[in-house]
Amino acid sequence: MVSKLTKSPPAPALKKGSLRKAVGGVINYSGGIIDRLMGRLISRKLVVWAAATLALCNGMLTSSDWVAVSLVYIGSQAAVDLAAKWKGA
């Protein structure tokens, strides 16, 4: 037996800003919850370096790739420190 498909009524139009108001308590639009926690606890560069180290230990990354990730981490951290020192001086 085949049932007849009926059209559902159209969804009500959202007022401007109503979605932001509804979701605003859960997600901050300046960044996600995980980003805010990670920003407070540890830097993303360090997380990438730690993930590369774990991948190296598990044989998922070659030593030369790990060295490249480490050099990028050290170089970018040095640039951040230099910029902070220059801005503060």
Image (tube, rainbow, N blue to C red):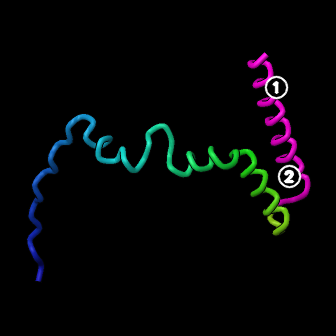
Say which amino acid is labelled 2. Asp
Q: Quadrant of residue 88?
A: top right
Disc 2 versus disc 1: nearer the observer: 1
* Relative horizontal placement of residue 84, taking residue 1 as reference (left or right): right
Q: Position of residue 85 (x, y in %)?
A: 80, 23
What residue is shown at x 62% (from left), y 45% (from top)?
A: 40
What residue is shown at x 25% (from left), y 40% (from top)?
A: 18
Q: Main secondary structure of the magenta part?
A: helix
The label on residue 65 is: 2
Q: Quadrant of residue 86?
A: top right
Q: Is 78 drawn above or below residue 40 in the view shown?
A: above
Mark 2–mark 1 distance (CA, rounded to whole Å): 26 Å
Residue on which the image places disc 1: 82
Please tell me which of labels 2 and 1 falls first in the chain: 2
What residue is shown at x 80% (from left), y 30% (from top)?
A: 81
SS at badge 2: helix
Q: Which residues are magenta?
A: 61-89
* Relative horizontal placement of residue 26, taking residue 84 as reference (left or right): left
* Relative horizontal placement of residue 12, taking residue 84 as reference (left or right): left
For the C terminus, the quadrant is top right
Q: Position of residue 53 (x, y in %)?
A: 82, 58
Q: Quadrant of residue 84?
A: top right
75 in the magenta segment: yes
- For label 2, the crowd category at 10 Å Cα-Cα, with few meaning under 14, some 14 to 19 and many 20 or more, is few
Nearest the camera: 61 or 16?
16
